[in-house]
Amino acid sequence: MNNQPFFLRCIRESCQQEFEITQKLYQCPTCSDLLDIVYNFPKIEGTQIRETFRQRRTSRDPLDLSGVWRYREFLPFAQKDLSNVITLGEGNSPILETPNSANYVGLTHLRVKHLGWNPSGSFKDHGMTVGLSQAKTLGSRVVACASTGNTSSSMAAYCARAGIRAVVFIPEGQIAYGKLAQTLDYGATTIQLEGDFDVAMSLVQELSEETDLYLMNSINPFRLEGQKTVMLELFDQLDWKIPDRIIVPGGNLGNSSSYGKALMELKQLGLIDKIPRITIIQASGADPLYRTLVTSSKELVPVSNAWTLASAIKIGRPISWKKALRALNFTDGWCDVANEQEIADAKAMLGSDGIGCEPASATTIAGLKKLLESSEHGASIDPDEDIIVILTGHQLKDPEYTINYHLDNLYQHAIYENLITEKSGKLISTFANQPIPMAADKEDIVRLLDL
Ligand code: F0G
């Protein structure tokens, strides 16, 4: 296998079995561990490849315009297979200054890369364009995923574009409305399962073993190859001035894993000397990686009945935990947690920067604030560091959360059915911006606005 340009390899040190890239595998058939896509990279000259990436930005070729396929030297596709690429012009998300959030966390300046500005409104599009292109190359007729809402929206969009049937499994009543709306609009068969994400994930894994379904969760290594290009685009945008730290939310742990892999490959090729430290932030009610790390456990410490209002990351048994740990080890990184109150206020703060995001993305700012205030060894962050925060999902994915926050009506546990029927654990709406009901009286309005 080693003479192939790319192949699959089991990540377990004691196994490392290799497989053809065309095999429809998600886990090692021998030891069931995760698989990596490994490259026999040709010699890549730094100045030249950086210039190639820059030139492609000015091209009109859809492959060059995609913020994923622009970096195709790092993707496992032969030239002949590029005709199967399914792209919606993903990537190309901006890096933005966030002065209010910087001040809130205690920094003089802070930048975010907002992956919510992708076609389906989340970072998943980076992985999905590659996953669906591989599905097309393999001739798959139906693809499936379990999801807390963003994977399913993205997969549904790319399936619609590819003309491939999409089946999504979502935990009933536990995904944000914007995401459900997208999945329906893109025409996916949408199965609302009784049970949480972890139940849906194991079910769809079994189905993909036993039937024709092509699994599109991040256990599929092609997904992570696409998400990996976020690092390439980021460094390209930064003119290869590598930041000190990258902060990313953690759920099923595919994203952080893919960033770690990108950094390993870039280092191996000599394209970067410096390794930014990856900091993963989980919600404190759904913190299996954090628990695993602080107990130095060799096995995942799962969280049964994981809970957070940041529904995208309400996951107790993340699939890619081993790869995420590998990313933390390679980058001397860390995983920490933020609680519901911290996440809610951090989200409002990002909103005040004119940017906004969905709750899961705001864990990053909440965690950063906490870590800057912390003096705990290994966990603290130095205020002089050059930090990039990765925002993963668009503000409009979960408007209900935002509205309830600003109406001072956000509860840690609540069943919302137009009116709240059950509630407990009221959160404080520290930065609430309430709408003002008024009659259409000009004088009253002038008085109110102090004009
Ligand atoms: N942020 C958002 C907005 C997400 O949708 C997710 C995951 C994450 C962060 C965490 O990323 O899983 O790679 O660690 N959403 C998945 C889904 C699980 O089904 O949409 P991760």
Image (tube, rainbow, N blue to C red):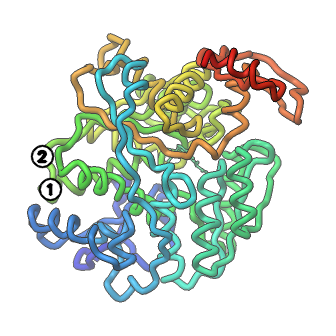
* Residue at image location 50% in from the left, 60% down from the top: 125
Instruction: Please tell me the numbered disc located at residue 271.
Output: 1
Q: For mark 1, give the secondary structure.
A: loop
Q: Position of residue 448 (x, y in %)?
A: 69, 16
Residue 107: tell me if it is visible: yes
Q: Position of residue 413 (x, y in %)?
A: 76, 24
Report the front residue among 347 and 333. Answer: 347
> Number of callouts in the render?
2
Q: Position of residue 104 (x, y in %)?
A: 42, 18
Residue kind at label 2, given as amino acid type: Asp
Residue at the spot of label 2: 273
Q: Is residue 237 left or right of residue 182?
A: left
Q: Quadrant of the N terminus?
A: bottom left
* Residue at image location 25% in from the left, 20% down from the top: 382
How far is the residue under mark 1 from the one under mark 2? 7 Å
Say above or below: 127 vs 391: below
Q: Quadrant of the C terminus?
A: top right
